[in-house]
Image (tube, grey):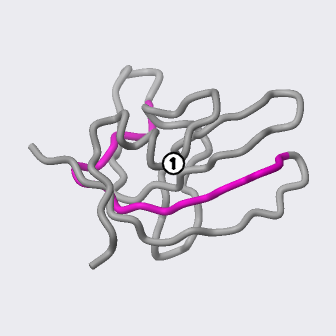
Amino acid sequence: MNKTATFIKKEESNNEMSMGHVIEIYKINPPLPHDWDFKTNEYQGETEYVYVSQANVFMSGWETFIFPYDIEKGEVIDWIELEGSTKGYYTPEEVLIAEGYKIVDQG
């Protein structure tokens, strides 16, 4: 199966606790699972939009995390990192590529 991550938009952050903060929104196919249920040890949902945040966080260092995103509301659904999130200096594209997604522009 071809995995694609379609770039939607880039946002600026004014978070005082991080420097160099980059936020990119993607539509991904296939969707990523999210909403882990600790009772059943299974995911309860999927997200086809992701918010990928790259930041140099005070006292923590560089991180690039993936979060489920509600495109209609324009907000993160849950602040628990999704599979593929990583510590270190990686661009949003690099993190999604590492998860097997091909980056494509909105066409």
Of the 4 image quadrants, the one containing the N terminus is top left
Q: Residue furthest left?
A: 1
Q: Nearer the viewer, residue 80 or 99?
A: 99
| Residue type, label 1 | Pro
The kind of secondary structure the magenta stretch mainly shows is: strand
Residue in the image at 34% along x and 45% along y:
45
Residue 9 lies left or right of residue 104; in this view the side is: right
Occupied quadrant, residue 49: bottom left
Q: What count of labels does the image hold?
A: 1
Residue 83 image point, x, y percent: 43, 32
Residue 102 image point, x, y percent: 27, 50
Query: Is residue 31 on the magenta stretch?
Result: yes
Q: Which residues are magenta?
A: 18-36
Residue in the image at 75% along x and 63% along y:
13
Residue in the image at 35% along x and 62% along y:
27
Q: Nearer the viewer, residue 34 or 7?
A: 7
Badge 1 is on which residue?
92
**Does residue 1 lie above or below 48 as drawn?**
above
**Does residue 3 lie above or below 25 as drawn?**
above
Residue 63 lies left or right of residue 48; in this view the side is: right
Residue in the image at 55% along x and 45% along y:
91
Q: Residues within 10 Å of mark 1 (few under 14, many from 20)?
A: many
**Does residue 3 lie above or below 80 as drawn?**
below
Q: Secondary structure at mark 1?
A: helix
Residue 84 image point, x, y percent: 44, 32
Residue 18 lies left or right of residue 105; in this view the side is: right
Residue 61 lies left or right of residue 28; in this view the side is: right
Of the 4 image quadrants, the one containing the C terminus is bottom left
